[in-house]
Amino acid sequence: MNVIGERINGMFTVIGDAISAKDPGPVRDMAIKQLEHGANTLDINVGTRVPKDERAEVMRWLVESVREVTDAPLAIDNPALSTMRVGIEAATKKGPAIINSTTGQEDKLASFMALAHEFSAGIICLAIDENGVAASTDAKLEIGMRSVGAAMDAGVPLEQVYLDPIILPVNCDQAAPGIVLETISQFGMLSDPAPHIVIGLSNLSQGASERPLINRTFLVMAIAAGLDASIHDPLDTGLMNEMITAEMLLNKSIYSNSYLKAHLQSL
Ligand code: THG
């Protein structure tokens, strides 16, 4: 599993305050802490508190702060092409990067895929287009197919493509998580090699009171359906242990009596 740590996001108070104070310390600390807890990739999101015309510069500062302590892959999390370019450029000076993300409108796909190609970056493609979040499995698959086609047209290798079916809070639409599971199992059949499949897990439990329980249960089901990347909180050790166990039970890692410890030591 590619664990994409979600904690460097201006929506969290610690990071929002560090951005306001231009203090790189808490950003560096959060990067190291997430990697120590099993993140492979770090999501970088300036949050919504930063005014639009300052987001590119704040993104550059966040990425450079993280790059002082790690050359791990960074997922640059922003919808605007201009901010994305600044973030990807800064991240790839010392290590790999993933564009997080593009939506599925043809013109948007073309410009973001061109950027992925230019920087040899990965790219996350959301099941969203001009009609909003695709609600049905068929509509999500259609956008997934369009995204894979756009990657091929732009010369972006499929190993660099991540499809995101979009998970929304279960307390808004209780039928949606099941549709996402069905979509995950079908995304894998869209191409050969198959695209990666990713979700922003914590969206699912926003506003709910049993957040960790809901996240953990769904992650296990999604892994069984074929999920191979997840944006979530690696500091939730229970969640990480369930993920590691699910992978062991699916024969993706070797069983031993100390498989949990072995996983951490392999980081
Ligand atoms: N897909 C992709 N990228 C994404 C998402 C996605 N990036 C953003 C988001 N969704 C994933 N990241 C988060 C980060 C935090 C939370 C949810 C998703 C979260 N935050 C607390 C809340 O809102 O309650 C904030 C807690 C606090 O303020 O301390 O839940 O779907 N590709």
Image (cartoon, rainbow, N blue to C red):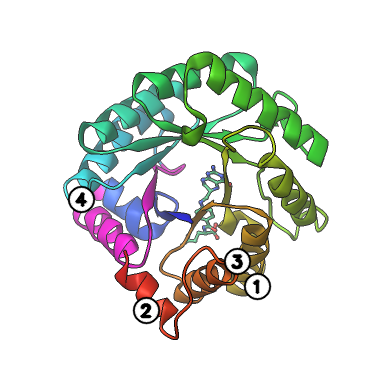
What mark, if any, has residue 209 been given in the picture? 1
Query: Does label 3 or label 1 sit earlier along the sequence?
Result: 1
Q: Using residue 34 as the reference point, say whether residue 246 is left or right of it.
A: right
Residue labelled 2 has its Cβ within 8 Å of some atom of ligand 1: no
Q: Which of the pair 167/145 is nearer the observer?
A: 145
Q: Which residue is mark 4?
A: 24
Question: Considering only vertical position in the picture, is 218 above or below 196?
Answer: below
In terms of depth relative to the viewer, which is nearer, 50 or 246? 246
- Tell me whether circle 4 and circle 2 mark residues in contact (CB < 8 Å): no
Q: Report the span colored magenta.
A: 21-49
Name the residue at the left extreme: 68
Which amino acid type is shown beneath numbered disc 4? Pro
Say which label, 2 or 1, has the lower sequence index: 1
Q: Which mark is residue 250?
A: 3
Check contact, mark 3 vs mark 1: CB within 8 A: no
| Quarter where residue 197 is shown | top right
